[in-house]
Amino acid sequence: MLSFWEKNSFITYDVIVIGGGIVGLSTAAALIEQNPSKHILVIERGALPTGASTKNAGFACFGSLTELLADLKTMTQEQVLSLVEMRWKGLLQLRQRLGDQHIGYEPAGGYELISQYQLSSLEHLEQINHLLFEIFGQEVFSLKNDDIKGFGFAPEHVKALVFNPLEGLIDTGLMMKNLWRYITERGVHVITGCQVYQLSQQQGEMTGVHCRTLEQEIEFQARQVAICTNAFAIELFPELDIVPGRGQVLITEPIENLRLRGGFHMDQGYYYFRNVGKRVLFGGGRNEDFAGETTLEFGVTPLIMNLLEEKLRTVILPYTNFRIAMRWAGIMAFGSTKQPIVKPLSTLPGVYLGVRMGGMGVAIGSLIGEQLATMMYQQTK
Ligand SMILES: Cc1cc2nc3c(=O)[nH]c(=O)nc-3n(C[C@H](O)[C@H](O)[C@H](O)COP(=O)(O)OP(=O)(O)OC[C@H]3O[C@@H](n4cnc5c(N)ncnc54)[C@H](O)[C@@H]3O)c2cc1C
């Protein structure tokens, strides 16, 4: 039961953003930058953001050589280049908005480990560099095979190493904490522990946003609503072309004399690892159990965890003793294409979608927030 005071001050907004991940917070940031007097509420169901944005690997990347080659088999050249450009622009925007020190950005470079059966991909290295030149104006991929030994990888598994100097690393937790701070300092209101279960059309072009909290049910109202719940959008709108994909991750205890530095990809981006100080963070393997990992459930499985540990032992840290410190999972959103969905919802006026971020939503999240905010702003003019 609401009080008179709560009803007057906490319920009605110009815009409600549903979802406190990088896309929701970036949408709120762009909206408040466009119009500092807007009353904006972000509603997040977790105590912390609970999807992918605080669970990911923190790669500031835009696609490895084998991943881009695989994409060129299922998408047009224009679509692949457009995605790469969105990721790159999104990263630049994130760095510009928050500042490198506030996202823990390290220009560490990225590498892809090439196995024996992937050696033929190197024949296309020049062709991909040529395509990417129009975005970056420089060579992106080059061979750095001398580093295979330097990083301590198993030479029987790693036959070549492709280097990308434009990749970097991010401290995901720091980035999200500072993005949160960025919007609240500018007057955006954030409510956590509040699950939206329904939207409804109300009088006066308002949308009702029906929520459950521990204590009560509340109906907030706003002229415009942005749905930024990524994979979880299908809980509210099952008809959307969204397929959830779980990503499992582990991190080791600190390893003395750890030799690897930077971000590393394997197998078309299905595996990824990096150093976090003296630790190794390693994730992926979804491709080994697509059916099992097509889920909105958090949690790790023995199948994927054993696989990750096995690869750590045999390929990445073959001569090193290590212990696993933590394991966790996050939920991503995929679909029939890799393009995010950014559009008005056809069934409810004033409601917009910014969802389906795929596997590189840290990279594109800021740009998608900007696009969504601009689309919403134009509708009010
Ligand atoms: C293991 C892993 C590693 C990854 N590594 C990288 C990487 O290195 N680089 C990269 O660019 N990308 C990476 N990604 C992808 C990236 O993290 C995601 O694409 C991105 O975080 C998606 O952001 P989002 O805001 O759209 O969604 P989310 O982060 O999922 O945010 C959605 C939010 O909505 C909330 N929510 C859901 N339903 C409701 C509801 N009904 N009511 C209220 N709130 C709700 C959720 O609690 C959640 O906080 C990785 C993902 C995973 C899982």
Image (cartoon, rainbow, N blue to C red):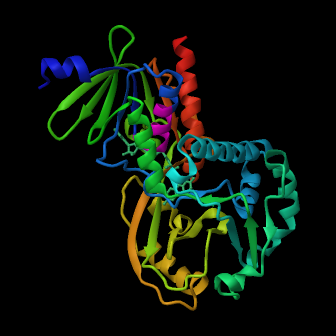
Eyeballing the image, is 301 above or below 362? below
Residue appearing at x 84%, y 45% in the figure: 134
Residue 297 on image: x %, y %:
36, 56
Q: Does residue 217 appear left or right of residue 289 in this picture?
A: left
Residue 217: name its quadrant: top left
Eyeballing the image, is 270 above or below 338? below
Between 381 and 287, the one nearer to me in the picture: 381
Residue appearing at x 74%, y 62% in the figure: 65
Eyeballing the image, is 310 above or below 21? below
Residue 66 on image: x %, y %:
73, 64
Q: Is residue 23 magenta?
A: yes
The stretch of residues the image draws in magenta is 20-29
Q: Does residue 361 appear left or right of residue 55 in this picture?
A: right
Q: Is residue 133 magenta?
A: no
Q: How many marks?
A: 0
Eyeballing the image, is 309 above or below 299? below
Residue 325 on image: x %, y %:
38, 76
The residue most toward the top is: 204
Q: Would residue 218 be seen by someone viewing this image from the given angle?
A: yes
Q: Quadrant of the N terminus?
A: top left
Q: Quadrant of the C terminus?
A: top right
Residue 193 on image: x %, y %:
26, 42
Q: Would residue 237 be seen by someone viewing this image from the given angle?
A: no
Magenta span: chief secondary structure: helix
Residue 261: name its quadrant: bottom right
